[in-house]
Amino acid sequence: MEGSACPSCALGELVMKAGAGRRMRYRHIPDLEIPAEVELPTCPACEQRWLDGEAMRRLEAALEDAYRTELVRKAEQAIETLRQHIAQRELERLLGVSAGWLSKVKKGKETSAPMAALLMLLAEQPHRVESLRRLWAVRPEPPRLFELAPVRVRVQSEGSRPSLYAVEAVQVAPSAQSVPSLISSEELEGVAA
Ligand SMILES: [Zn+2]
């Protein structure tokens, strides 16, 4: 492959090229970075990469490693975020995993894509942990209001005009009775603007 003319632009001869910042879809990750050290036949003129069987095998192996690393990184990040909202043991109970499992993941233990997906979703909307608690019941109760409209704000007033909206605070200040105690994130953006 190396040394042959670029089939795309015909202006360059393919050379083996490594480098950071090359991204491509791999499995369900749309922008996985190809590890910088992986050399691929590349056209110096149009930057197009052309893979022969050998380059394909090396790329596959490198991407699989990068993918596994990314899964662990995403799970670790989500666990770290969730730590601020729920005790680790309690989260393990709600996920149905053994005690200490989350610590192992944080130390780099391999995790599955579905588990990483669940952790990411929970970390993005930590109030859904409460939904999980409810949904595990054989006959779940209907969702409570704050599960559906997650952003609860505390409003501190100066005079009659609210000056500060604290997102995800649980208390509503008594002085805030004239303003909504529960507003959607869209509304909050409107307020902040
Ligand atoms: Zn080219």
Image (cartoon, helix red, strand yellow):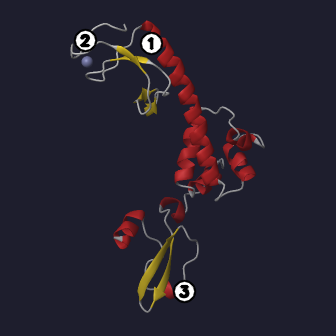
Residue at image position (44%, 77%) is: 180
Mark seen at residue 55: 1
Q: CA distance from mark 2 to mark 3?
A: 71 Å
Q: Residue furthest bottom?
A: 159
- Ligand 1 occupies quarter: top left
Name the residue nearer the viewer: 28 or 11: 11
Q: Assess whether mark 1 and mark 2 are in contact (beta carbons under 8 angstroms).
A: no
Mark seen at residue 174: 3
From the viewer's perspective, is residue 172 above or below residue 37? below
Residue at image position (21%, 15%) is: 11
Q: CA distance from mark 2 to mark 1?
A: 16 Å
Residue 76 can be seen, yes or no: yes
From the viewer's perspective, is residue 76 above or below residue 32? below
Name the residue nearer the viewer: 80 or 13: 13
Q: CA distance from mark 3 to mark 1?
A: 66 Å
Mark seen at residue 97: none
Residue at image position (41%, 31%) is: 23
- Of badges 2 and 3, nearer the viewer stands 2
Q: Label 2 belongs to which residue?
A: 7
Quarter-wise, where is residue 192 in the image?
Answer: bottom left
